[in-house]
Amino acid sequence: MSYKNFPMVPRVIFGRGSFNQLSELLAPNRLSNNAPFIFLVDDVFRTNVNITSRIPIAYQDKIILVSTAEEPKTSQVDELVEDIILTSKERPSGIIGIGGGSILDLAKAVAIMLTNEGNAEDYQGWDLVKNKALYHVGIPTISGTGAEVSRTTVLTGPKRKLGINSDFTPFDQVVLDPELTNGAPKDQWFYTGMDCFIHCVESLNGTYLNAFSKTYGDTAYGLCKEIYLDGNLTKKEAQDKLMMASWHGGMSIAYSQVGVAHAMSYGLSYLLGTKHGIGNCIVFNHLEEFYPNDVKLFKEMLEKHNINMPVGICKDLSKKDFDTMIDVALGLEPLWENAIGKNWKKTITRKKLKELYSKM
Amino acid sequence: MSYKNFPMVPRVIFGRGSFNQLSELLAPNRLSNNAPFIFLVDDVFRTNVNITSRIPIAYQDKIILVSTAEEPKTSQVDELVEDIILTSKERPSGIIGIGGGSILDLAKAVAIMLTNEGNAEDYQGWDLVKNKALYHVGIPTISGTGAEVSRTTVLTGPKRKLGINSDFTPFDQVVLDPELTNGAPKDQWFYTGMDCFIHCVESLNGTYLNAFSKTYGDTAYGLCKEIYLDGNLTKKEAQDKLMMASWHGGMSIAYSQVGVAHAMSYGLSYLLGTKHGIGNCIVFNHLEEFYPNDVKLFKEMLEKHNINMPVGICKDLSKKDFDTMIDVALGLEPLWENAIGKNWKKTITRKKLKELYSKM
């Protein structure tokens, strides 16, 4: 038996207002005055002076505002990398992602592709990256995805939606400042937080689970219940705890895997562009047979927070569309093996997935 | 307000039998055939073939068996460093500690002192280390200390018992193999596990606590109760969970501090050479006024596991002896500030500590 040697984020700073220390965190990592820091920032912050004015710009440093209207694409990574190479005098000192899961994943992928040849799609899969990525920093502005701590960056490519999973993917530095999550729209707060809840459910109920992943998963799962069900927390407490839930939930995947919701959500996202958080929720809502207790809890959370989930998003799809989604979902073998076990192909048939997708 | 940028162990492997992968973990870090890996191994394993025969020795690599009859000393670190320099053709490729908290702390300190001038005692304190330590690996064979994940290495020097706290202290690699904890004597299993329980109590009840440390502390605290009180676990489950409790308990100190038990236990250890785990227990047993509920739980655990704690260890001490212990304890200002608050000097007087030590 061979265990994975898991790479952890080597530096983390946690605290309300810790974003103000970004300048001192970056300074020792500046390679030269001509080697800029590139800040990839979610363009929802375009007019948010509280964020943009506090980004420490010096020398040739540059802010690139990135739309996250769509899930991150391999082509988008390639374009960003080309733009950065063309406009920088020297190879950048580092890439800093400031935003949600999409921005964090883009920052990780861009940092990898600045030191590895070819196109981003060439590296979708497991352990295909050859060279150490550029120094890269993750600063989440919404909590739940676990992207700040994971060894993947999930991208939609021409052929598939799949992560660049590698030891070089994790950030070199993470800044956890719960204040930055102020002002996230309620729906997004819910769907992104549920990404964490669903991570935990899938990890804790998976066949890959060990004591390492279980202790992290139990912690994050408990925090999610406290935040989304118990409702006894102040706003600040809830922000702080959700940021930590996301962190621990991400760590829970270290030795485990996600499961049915993620596999099927990737299908929705690939075909329809459904964003990851809401896509997970749309799928999870119909997974009683796989995760009975937790789907019940999820429905209670939906009700408590008055969230109206989209319905009927698959009703007008063609047979070809269903086939596309089913192909993407079935391609994620480790997720199914974790969720169902080694013999998953006996029960997870194309017909079964068609039935499930048809309900959504 | 300025937050600490916490260094995390960048690589961790967890799993029963993962010790067998040590060779492949070390190989990429070998600098040359003349640059040995030095294995510092607790000499209780001298005749334990299950451990010693599985240590992967090649080229000039060397096993040094180290007695842990006494707490680690700065002079012991200096001697080990001198011995390694004199007997190695080149600066070693790395230091691997295999043992309990004492061995792990020695491995960390030796790795630091092989790249920093002077003597180990010069670096006791906070952030005094100038140069990156040698590559160093921690492999715990008993669980509870948190030394595998902490940024300190606690040493008894000529003047004081105090850690070398620095960003260069944490291990570069940790191997968490719960099988290695097979065969630890019951008393030691109890006292070392209680080190974790007491870490958590001190962190969770400290004034420094934030959501980061709290989530780790709550996790480890819950695991300790499950292991030492509930008693529904198989031996393997308990081993796995205690190894994770130690890990999370260590992480809980990241943004927090230990408290009264550790401060006073350092005094006992400095004067009497009391080992850290049992010393903590001897002190904690008398701290009802600081940690009422948890001291009650601790007494239940003592009873459940039929542990007979030493009593009267301070009964024949002189006034000078008490003064020495009190000086050591009061010198640990961050611990008192965490435990009691900024005004701790009002209540923590020499008289107060004398009274407490007299009970032990």
Image: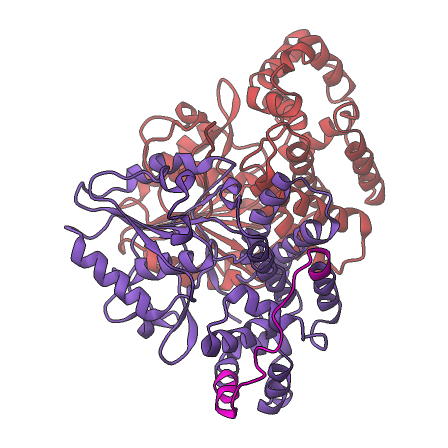
Chain colours: A purple, B red
| Residue A354, image x, y percentages | 59, 87
Which image quadrant is residue B331 in? top right
Image label count = 0
**Closer to the camera in the image, A30 or B236:** A30
Position of B49 with respect to A39 (left or right) is: right
| Residue B328, image x, y percentages | 58, 17
- Asked if B309 appears above or below A104 in the picture, the reply is above
Which image quadrant is residue B102 in? top right
**Closer to the camera in the image, B146 or A346:** A346
A66 drawn magenta: no
Q: Is residue A305 visible?
A: yes
Q: Is residue A168 visible?
A: no
Position of A198 with respect to A183 (left or right) is: right
| Residue B311, image x, y percentages | 79, 26
**Closer to the camera in the image, A7 or A98:** A98
Residue at image position (62%, 24%) is: B263
**Closer to the camera in the image, B51 or A164:** A164
- Asked if A265 appears above or below A232 in the picture, the reply is below
Position of B29 with respect to A93 (left or right) is: right
- Where is the C terminus of chain A found, in terms of image quarters? bottom right
Q: Magenta residues, as a range?
A: A302-326
| Residue B22, image x, y percentages | 45, 60
A308 drawn magenta: yes
Residue at image position (46%, 34%) is: B4
Residue that extends furthest to the left in the rendered view of this protein: A89
